[in-house]
Image (tube, rainbow, N blue to C red):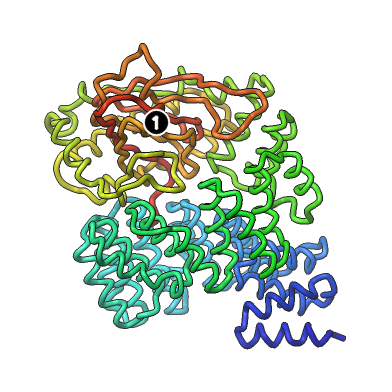
Amino acid sequence: MSSSAEQRALQALQQGRIAEACQLFASIAPSLRTRKSLFAAAVAFASGSRFAEALGMLQRLDGGQQPDVESLNLRADICVQMGRNRDAAAIYSELLQRGQTDDALHYKLAQALFGAGAVEPAQEALEPALRAKTGQTRTQAKLLKARCEAALGHLDQAQVQLEKLQKNGQLKDVAQYRLARLALHRGDYAKAEKLLAAFLRKQPNSEPAHQAMLLSHIYSGKTAQAQATIKQLPERANDVETLAIAGDYVHEMGLGDVFEYWQRAWVHRHDPAVYRAYMTRLIARRDIEGVRVLLDEYAAAHRRDGLWEWGQMNWLRLTGDHQGIVDLAGASNMSELHHESSCLAHFALGRYDKALSDAMALNNQFPSDQYFIAMLLTALRCLDDPRYGQLVNYDAMLYEVDLKDLDAEAGGAIDWTALAGEVAALHKMQDSPMLQSVKSGTQSPGNLFTANRQGAIVQLGRLIERQAQRVFAQVSELNQPQEHPLRMFRPQRPMMHASWSIQAAAATYHESHVHSKGWFSGTCYLDVPSVLSNDSADGQLVFGEPPFETKDKLTAEAQVLPEVGKLVLFPSYFWHGTRSFTGSERRLVAAFDFGAPDCFV
C-alpha cells in the first residue's frame, strides 16, 4: 500500500506541480517499490531538470533487466534534454529494432541525430517520417528537413522550404520562427527582428523567440534594446540558456553586476539549472565564499544530491583539497557523475593511472568531446605512454600556411589592413567573455563568416575554407589507426560551424584550452604587434600546456609566431593558449572550428 506522501507526490505530478512532486518523491525515494511509483518519480525528476535522479529511478525500475519500451522512451527523452543526443539516438534506434512502428519514433530519431550534429544521417532517418500517415508528423519532418539543409550550408534551399511551410496551417508559426533564425544566422538582423516581432505577437511567451530577439539586438549592436529585454529576465525567463546569454552580455558590456543578476534568478525559483550556471560563473571567478554560500542554499532547497556534490567538489578544488574530492567521489552513490572532478584531483595528486581511468570513463560517456580526449592524452603524457606521441604529433598535425601567398585564390588580393579594420569594427564588447579562454581581450559577437557576407571578410572565409579542405585531405593520408581521434570522430563532411574574432591588447592572453565541439580548429592573424619575434615567447601561440594542476608540471611542447596572413590549423583536442606581450599595438585574429554542421537554424 502506498504512503500518503507517495499519493501526494503522484497527485502533485498529475496536477503539474513539478517542484512539489520532486520534493515529495525525493523525501520518499528509498521506500518507492512499485513500477508505477518509480516511473512517476522518474517523470517528475525529468520534468524538474533533475536528470541524474530521474535516471536513477529508471535504473531501479529496470532492476538489472532489459528495460521495457516505456522506460526506454523516457530514458531517451531525458538524454535529449541533457544534450546527450547521441545516446538518445542509440536508444531510439533500439526501439525501432524492437519492432516499434510509431511514425513519430523515426522523427524523434532524426531529431536526436540532428541534435548530435549527425545531419546527413538525420536526413536519411527522416525519410520514413516524411511518408508518415499522420499529417503532423509529415509536416514536422519537412520542417526538420529544412533545418538540415540550413545546417549543411544550403541556406537558399532552406529558405525556400521554410517559406513553403509558412503557408501551411499546422506549422506556419514555427516555420516563421525558423525563418527568423535563418535571417539571424545570415546577419540579416532587420528581417530577423521583423519576423520575430510578428511571431511574438501570436506567441508572446515563447522563450526561444525572446532569446533570438535578444541575440539579434546583441549582434546588431542595439545596446538599449538589449538592456530593456534583459532587465526583467531574472524573474521572467524560464530558459537558462537565455539567462546565460543575457548575463554574459551584461558582463562583457560592463552594464552591471552579473553576479547580482544571477543571484536574482536563483532566489526567484531555486532552479537546479540556474544553480549550475550560477555556480559555474562563481567558480570561474574563483569566488570561494560565493561558492560556499550557494552550496548551502542549494542544499537547503534540494538536499545534498549529485548536483550539490559537483559544486562541493569544485569548492574543494578551489581550496586545494584534492584528496577531499577523491573521498567524496568514492563515497557518492552517483559516482558516474563525478569522473571529471575525480580525474582533475588525481592529476593534482600525481595519481596519473587513476586520472587515466577517469578520463577513459569520460570518453566512454562523451565520445568525441575534445576536452575529455585532451584529458586522456594528458594522462598518457604524464605516464610516459608511447601512445601519446602517436596522438599528439605536432610535426604531422600542426599546419602553418601563409595566406598572402594564396591571395589570388580569394578572387583578388586581400587588403589585410582594410580587412583588419572591418573585423576590428565588429568588436563592441568592453570585457572578455567570462567562460572563455581569452583574458583582458574582446570577442566579436555572432558567427563571423556566416553573418558578415560582404567585403574582405567574405574573401578571407573562402580562402580559409579552401585551404582547410586541402589540409583535411592531407590528414586523411596520415594512415592513422581506426581508433585515432582524428579518424574516429571525423565528420562525414567537415564544416566550419563556428567562427569569431579576438582582439587583444598587451595584457591579453588565452588560458590553455581546447575546442570541445570541434574536430579541427584554427586561427588566422589579421594584425600583429611589431615587437613579436622568435627571440621571445611574448605573444606566441603555445601548445601542450594543460589548464589544470598536475603534480609534475607540464610545459609547452610547440609554439607558433603570429604573422599577418598566417593561417594555423590543428586538431581541436590540442591544448593551446597564448602569451601576453608588451607595447601599445594590438593582436587581431579570426578563429574558427571545423566539425559537425552548425545546427543553429
Residue marked by disc 1: 472
Which residue shows up at 29% across the image and 81% down it? 201
Name which quarter of the figure residue 399 lies in: top left
In this rendering, the answer to whether 393 lies above or below 433 is above
| Viewer-proximal residue among 396 and 545 | 545
In the picture, which quadrant includes the N terminus?
Answer: bottom right
Which residue occupies 41% across, 72% down? Answer: 207
Looking at the image, which is closer to me, 454 or 507?
507
Q: Measuring 45% from the left and 69% from the top, which residue is drawn there?
A: 234
Q: Amino acid at mark 1?
A: Phe
Q: Residue at x 39, y 61 (%)?
A: 246
**Is residue 312 toward the left or the right of residue 564 in the image?**
right
Residue 57 appears in the figure: yes
User: Where, by quadrant of the figure, is residue 217 drawn?
Assistant: bottom left
Q: Position of residue 375 (x, y in %)?
A: 60, 35
Q: Quadrant of residue 436?
A: top left
Local packing at callout 1 (Cα closer than 10 Å; few below 14, some 14-19, many 20+) is some
Looking at the rendered image, the quarter that the C terminus falls into is bottom left
